[in-house]
Image (cartoon, coloured by chain):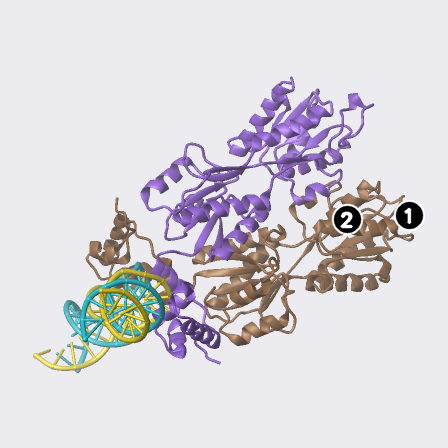
Chain colours: A brown, B purple, C cyan, D yellow
DNA sequence: GCACGGCTTGTAATCGTTTACAAGCCCCTA
DNA sequence: TAGGGGCTTGTAAACGATTACAAGCCGTGC
């Protein structure tokens, strides 16, 4: 009917009360008398009123939104995590803005733009490669909204965060391979400076030692978490004279690229080489052979990060500033005893 | 230094002008004198001023944001498209909100909540399964922000949209298979009511006829675009007595699930059955065998949808209300002549 | 000398909400 | 009957920007 959208004034007029009462009836129903409350609700229904967020945000000096900073929006790894974030945030009235930190030439300028409490009420940073200096500068320059790290983190800053036990994931992978009888295990690592790469590589090295093996440089391949880098590592594996019988990959995408490229060269997985991934992305269970991998609870990770942030935004102090979620090994069919143990059984 | 964040008042004071002049210097620099403009810019730098979006939005009666409604945030298919959308929108000062239409029990209520011009300045709807009635009700009930369809669409509504030529994609796939000598071609379809499923299935049926084949019901498998449904279809294929020698899958995810499951049952691709996918997602080129598929320009699709929406939001009339982007066949190694043609060559 | 128009600037209203403060009402107690 | 306290409500001032309108200044033409 009415062209103009209803405002709180219209509701007040219809209900025969003041705008203050309408506002209170909607936000703190407890303090208004029951009859008034009912009249207000009826007027709201009659007018079709919904709150104007811009006005509310202006008055309350908040933005109503949370920004998630991911390295690259197009990376599907984050989609499930962000789904968890959104699911936790939206019942609380926050909307989720997703921005990437790495695309475009002026990425740093845009990042700094987000480090400002007028843009968002809170930030979730999924990118540990943001230079610490930038962040520190942002922290000191102006009021910074509450910030939490998720997945990745930046050392030396006292910022709460949620992550998984990356080193433990690597240990599980090595223990599984060692249990199958492998004594020659290589590692396809993530991008060199990345905290996840470092943690997983550290857990890998430590677990090797614990099982009486030692890390060999020529069996360590640098990757960058992408399919392409997995395929590239396969080339390097093929060129080796003395090859590892198993490779622990720091991501499923790399593992898929690695396995796919090997198979195209006639190498059989797991007969010729066992492969363990990391992440347990959807496709891992559907490729052939299905990939043995380390599961990380992505949805929960997003939910926990959002919950941490909401506590911070509410001004509460966190019970735990550092949340570490457990991982678990998902045994599928890309791992088996090494060829020299051919008499042994396949992976249980 | 200063605790409080700077407002336009602070800038005005420092520059020695009125707030109106500051506002003009920033939004319409042409109308202020050069000396004044410089003074204002200097003051902006000195104070570290950035605009308060809530205040601007309130005054301008806009929200500054665009909502993308996708069926499911966690579906990686959309990530690249959304990346294109965000890239186009953000230079224009819009931020992108991503919401899903299918998760949660009160999904419909939430959807209706977005059909309101106070929530967003524009909407991009990626879900053709929203009941037409809901949308029509939303359209009539209150002022609706500009809306465009992307990828999917809803028939019978005069809403502009961007999509790819789905039928042509199916035709390319069939032509490719027919060219290899296949005369027994099956189809793994998307979810039954979906517009993409329907268009692709229609293009498939039409192309079969054009090549002198006919569609057989027992060679048509229902899927839902997921990996699991592809694996399930593989079971059905295995149970067939009389099998097609090639299968055109309506999505790459299904194709991957299908191929993976077949391989685990010892069926060789493409020797025993050729498979064509649709979408050309990243993994398609990395599985073994690499998947022959129909490429759709996902980033461009997002960009075009965003551009359409921006025109609408600017009040312009669109030069083309219906944008159809071309597709192309990417020939890889999951297709080959059928076994009966064993003498023939592999796919070029 | 005056009117006029172009350029630039300031004044002040406005967007729609929330919320500090004050005030009205009613009941109870002294 | 006065006073106090609890409950409920209204008044009006914010929040920080944009913009319609008016006005000042200056040069030009008659």
Residue A293 shows in the view: no
Say which quarter of the image contains residue A1: top left
* Residue drawn 38% across the image and 75% down it: B12
Quarter holding the C terminus of chain B is top right
B255 displayed left or right of B33: right
* Residue drawn 45% across the image and 58% down it: A94
Chain assignment, label 1: A
Task: From the top left corner, tell me how far across and down residue B339 is, in percent.
Answer: 78, 24
Q: Is residue B283 above or below residue A103?
A: above
Q: B297 and B54: which one is in front?
A: B297
D10 displayed left or right of A338: left
Determine which residue is flagged by label 2. A231
Q: Is residue A186 above or below residue D10?
A: above
Task: From the top left corner, tell me how far across and down residue B170 is, in percent.
Answer: 61, 29
Task: From the top left corner, tell me how far across and down residue B288 is, in percent.
Answer: 75, 39
Q: Is residue B247 above or below residue B227?
A: above
Say which quarter of the image contains residue A214: bottom right
Label 1: how many Cα within 10 Å (few below 14, some 14–19, many 20+): few
Determine which residue is flagged by label 1. A340
Indicate the secondary structure of the residue bearing disc 1: helix
Q: CA gap, disc 2 to disc 1? A: 26 Å
Task: From the top left corner, tell me how far across and down residue A241 is, in percent.
Answer: 92, 52
Q: Nearer the viewer, mark 2 or mark 1?
A: 2
Q: A155 and B23: which one is in front?
A: B23
Label 2: how many Cα within 10 Å (few below 14, some 14–19, many 20+): many
Indicate the secondary structure of the residue bearing disc 2: helix
């Amino acid at each position: 009917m009415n062209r103009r959208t209803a405002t709180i004034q219209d509701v007040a007029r219809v209900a025969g009360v003041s705008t203050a009462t309408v506002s209170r009836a909607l936000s703190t129903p407890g303090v208004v008398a029951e009859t008034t409350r009912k009249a207000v609700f009826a007027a709201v229904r009659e007018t079709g009123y919904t709150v104007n967020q811009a006005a509310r945000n202006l008055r309350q000096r908040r933005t109503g939104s949370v920004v998630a900073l991911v390295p690259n929006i197009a990376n599907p790894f984050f989609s499930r995590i962000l789904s968890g974030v959104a699911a936790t945030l939206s019942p609380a009235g926050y909307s989720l803005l997703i921005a990437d930190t790495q695309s475009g030439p002026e990425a740093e300028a845009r990042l700094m733009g987000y480090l400002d409490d007028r843009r968002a009420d809170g930030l979730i940073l999924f990118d540990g490669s943001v230079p610490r200096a930038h962040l520190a500068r942002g922290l000191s320059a102006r009021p910074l909204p509450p910030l939490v790290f998720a997945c990745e983190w930046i050392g030396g800053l006292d910022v709460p965060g949620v992550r998984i036990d990356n080193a433990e994931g690597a240990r599980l992978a090595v223990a599984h391979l060692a249990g199958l009888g492998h004594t020659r295990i290589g590692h396809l690592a993530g991008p060199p400076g990345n905290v996840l790469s470092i943690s997983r590589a550290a857990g890998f090295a430590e677990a090797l030692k614990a099982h009486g093996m030692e890390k060999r440089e020529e069996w360590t391949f640098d990757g960058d978490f992408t399919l392409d880098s997995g395929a590239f590592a396969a080339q390097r594996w093929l060129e080796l004279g003395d090859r590892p019988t198993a490779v622990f990959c720091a991501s499923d995408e790399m593992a898929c690229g690695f396995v796919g490229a090997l198979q195209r060269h006639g190498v059989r997985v797991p007969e010729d080489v066992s492969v363990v991934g990391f992440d347990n992305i959807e496709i891992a269970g559907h490729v052939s052979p299905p990939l043995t991998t380390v599961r990380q609870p992505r949805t929960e990770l997003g939910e926990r990060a959002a919950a941490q942030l909401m506590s911070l935004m509410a001004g509460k102090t966190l019970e735990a500033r550092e949340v570490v979620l457990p991982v678990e090994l998902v045994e599928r069919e890309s791992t088996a005893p090494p060829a020299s143990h051919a008499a042994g059984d396949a992976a249980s």
